[in-house]
Structures are given as C-alpha cells and as structure tokens.
Amino acid sequence: MAERADTDALFKALADPGRRKLLDQLHAHDGQTLTQLCEHLDMTRQGVTQHLNALEAANLVAVVWRGREKLHFLNPVPLQEIYERWIAKFEKPRLKAIADLKRKLEKTHG
Amino acid sequence: MARSTFVYVTYIRTTQQKLWSALTTDTEFMKQYWFGVHCRSEWTAGSSWQMLGPDGELFDDGSIVAADPPRRLVIRWQHQRKPEIKAEGESRCTYELETLGSAVRLQITHTIERDPPSKFIEAVSGGWPKILSNLKSLLEGGAAVLTDPYPTDKSTASDKK
C-alpha cells in the first residue's frame, strides 16, 4: 500500500506541465532558490511554491539549506525506479529482437 | 568558485542500523548493489577510505571526514583512474540517515568545489540513482534490480555475437 501511495504521488507530480517545467529548470541548473526559479517561469511565486511542495512530496525535489538559503535539487532516484519497473525489464527482449532481425536481413542480402 | 552538487534522496523500508551497515561495513552486501564495487575503511573520523573495483583495483581514494553512526558520514573522495577526473581534485560526499515512520530517509549529497559542469559529478550522477535503486530493492527484501550498470550497452554487445 505504501508503495502505491509513493507511486501515486510521483505520477501526479509529473502530470502537470508547470511542474515538469520546474524539473527542466532544475535539470538545467540544479540547486536553485525559489526566487531564481521564479525568474524563468511565467507563474506566481505562490504557484511555484505549491508546485515545489508537490514535487518535494513526491521525492522528485530534494531541499538543502545553505545558511538561510533554501536550495532545490532535482532528485532523479524515483525516476530511476520508474525506469526499472516499467522499462528496463522490456529492454533486453526488444534489443534482442532488433539484433536478430538485423542478423537475418544481413544474411539474406549478404 | 562555484560548486557542482548533486543530491539524491531515497526512502527505504529498513532500519537505520541495517542501512548504515549496508553503506559501510558490510562489503559483501555492498558488492551486490554497487556493481561489484566495495569500499574499504575503518569508518571512523580520520581513517582512510578507498573504493575498490571487482578485481581490487583502486577506483577512488580519500578519507572519512566525519562519522556519526548510524546518522551521518562525510567522505573526502577523489577519483583515481581517469586522469581528467582525478585532475578535478577532491569531492565531498555526505550520507545522512533519518528514520521516518517505517522507513529510513537516505540523503546523499555529492559536491565538488568547481564551476559546473564537473566531469566528476557527471560520472557519479549516472551511477548514484542506479546504486540507490538496487540498494532499496535489496534491503526491502527483493533482489537487485540491475546487475549491470549499463544493461543496454552490454545486452546489445552480447546479442551481436
């Protein structure tokens, strides 16, 4: 059940274009303050704060305090877990299928 | 000079003590989630620290800056194998463990005092999420999800045979 709650929060957090834009911002420049993030976004400060809270709850953003500055970092660990759960296990058979196809085609034409 | 920092956070359903051992003294366990790599250290402040590859080759060298088991560990960490990464100098890696309900929150902060982009941070940033994901699966009772750090490269290569 706990795992399902984590996953729900994660996909809900990703299901918003504003939040994805915030993640893109952090991907380009990690460790930004709220003020720095607001400079590049067409959103109110309150809107950005709410989005950051949702991203933090989904563990997609990690917060580090440096003195009085609150810095936001993109945390890719949950994305890695999604990748492994839904993509990585399909990868090997697919790559094998492509390799087999290539071998067969090159044999008939070679 | 600016700094390059990466932060990784994961929540693992285990105890702080078990997670601490998995990250430090339990080298056999470490090899299972760290792609055959393990660390050698006394894990006390001031002691030396090395990361060794599957054949015992030296990958990284450094020392323990601070150790407060099972809560906080700070490692002074310098890469050794690739000259261009070694030239970037020392990095600092901090592990912070905190129990939250039935899980332990693990935060890894890896910093190097130089302007981004850092080759060192680039090199470790691909690895940490995979290592942490494996560690989580193993500690929560499953098997390691990935046994190879670069499954796509390897599977492509072996399929070509």
Image (cartoon, coloured by chain):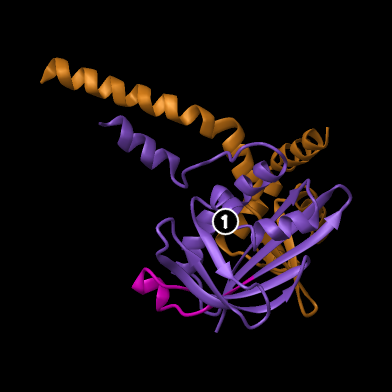
Chain colours: A orange, B purple
The answer to which quarter of the image holds residue A25 is bottom right
The answer to which quarter of the image holds residue A38 is bottom right
Residue at 13% across / 18% down in the picture? A109
- Residue B117, compared with residue B33, is above or below; it is below
The type of residue carrying mark 1 is Trp
Question: Which residue is disc 1 drawn over?
Answer: B128
Q: Quadrant of the C terminus of chain A?
A: top left
- Residue A102, compared with residue A17, is above or below; it is above
Q: Position of residue A45 (x, y in %)?
A: 80, 61
- Residue A69, compared with residue B159, is above or below; it is below
Q: Is residue B102 left or right of residue B94?
A: right
Check the residue under mark 1 and report the chain it is in.
B
Does the image show residue B132? yes
Per the image, label 1 sits on a secondary structure element best described as helix
Q: Which residues are magenta?
A: B78-93
Q: Position of residue B93 (x, y in %)?
A: 61, 71
In the displayed orientation, state which residue is furthest to the right: B101
Was residue B87 drawn as part of the magenta stretch in this picture?
yes
Q: Position of residue B30 (x, y in %)?
A: 59, 54
Q: Position of residue B143 (x, y in %)?
A: 61, 37
Q: Is residue A72 left or right of residue B5?
A: right
Depth check: give the residue in front, A97 or B44. Answer: B44
